Image (cartoon, rainbow, N blue to C red):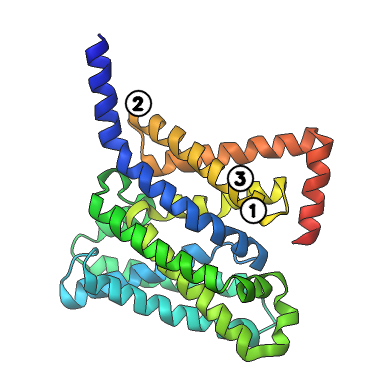
Amino acid sequence: MFVNERISNVVMIQIIGLPFLICILMSFILGYLGIHVLKREVIFIDIAMAQVAVVGSIIAHLAFEVHEDSLLAYACSLGCVLIMAVFYAVIRSKMFQISLEAIIGISYVIAAATALFLVGIAPGGHIHIQNILSGSLLWTRWRDVAVILLTFSAVGFCFYLIRKPLTNASNGYHQALNKRIEIIFWDFIFYLLLGIVIMLSVQISGIVVVFAFLIIPGTISVIISSRLTVQLMIIWAAATMASIMGLLFSYYLDFSIGPSIALFLGGELILIAIITRFCGGYSSCFRRDIMKY
């Protein structure tokens, strides 16, 4: 029995080990980005960027008959992300009649409609839809881990270099508008780097997991603390715990990995919300954080 249990544990690690590594890598970079997304009030930017990247991938598939994980497909996706980064950066400083979130929603609808049209004429189009939603975390390879690690490390280093202007732009956008050229430039850099992270993440894990990692841990951290270092620790702890529980849940109950992780992240947020409701100390902290943001 002991031998059988040991073999079972080895098999489990072989199956969920690489997906767990991908989840940890995504939580590190997406958690940090989530704080800026919440401050900028562009909650659905990841869905819009992901949909635009998918359009680029489908165009590459139709025009050049390449697979979605090929270098050319990534190049086409990056080109679409680059165009949208310029658009979001410029439109935010030019149009004040409607919010940027509304513009993001409109661009998502247009990109989604374009993707559905292209999927309808592309061979195996239903596979693209499935990958967009749930991804393919279960089939993660060491190559995927290496690509994610190198890319996210480079993006993280860029964010470290520009942390001060990026933080200033996120904390006080309207005050920074006095230096319009500079704010457009830093917005463009932010949306471009965010788009690169989302493009790679969605390719592997799907929109559901990416959105959950981007928004939910950041929301939990903002509820508990207003200090960035503490927020990051909370984000990574919450994401790690949800990843472990979600992967084990999907392994033992034969459930999809992505939705499992998102469900446990949602459960953590509900638990924190209950604490803030019935614990006066946390509630007052929550109110102070909301006023800051």
N-term-proximal mark, 1 vs 2 = 1
Between 58 and 280, the one lying in front of the other is 280
Distance from the alpha carbon under mark 1 to that under mark 2: 35 Å
**Amino acid type, callout 1:** Thr
Asked if 264 appears above or below 37 in the picture, the reply is: above
Residue at 50% across / 57% down in the picture?
A: 30
Asked if 38 appears above or below 273 in the picture, the reply is: below
N-term-proximal mark, 3 vs 2 = 3
How many C-alpha atoms fall within 10 Å of the one at disc 1: few (<14), some, or many (≥20)?
few
**Amino acid type, callout 3:** Ile
**Amino acid type, callout 2:** Tyr
Picture disc at residue 234: 3
> Which residue is identified by label 1?
229
Distance from the alpha carbon under mark 3 to that under mark 1: 9 Å
Quarter-of-image position of residue 12: top left
Tell me where residue 240 appears, x and y as whole percent: 49, 41
In the displayed structure image, the side of residue 209 where residue 293 appears, left or right: right
Q: Is residue 16 in sight in this rendering?
A: yes
In the displayed structure image, the side of residue 241 where residue 25 appears, left or right: left
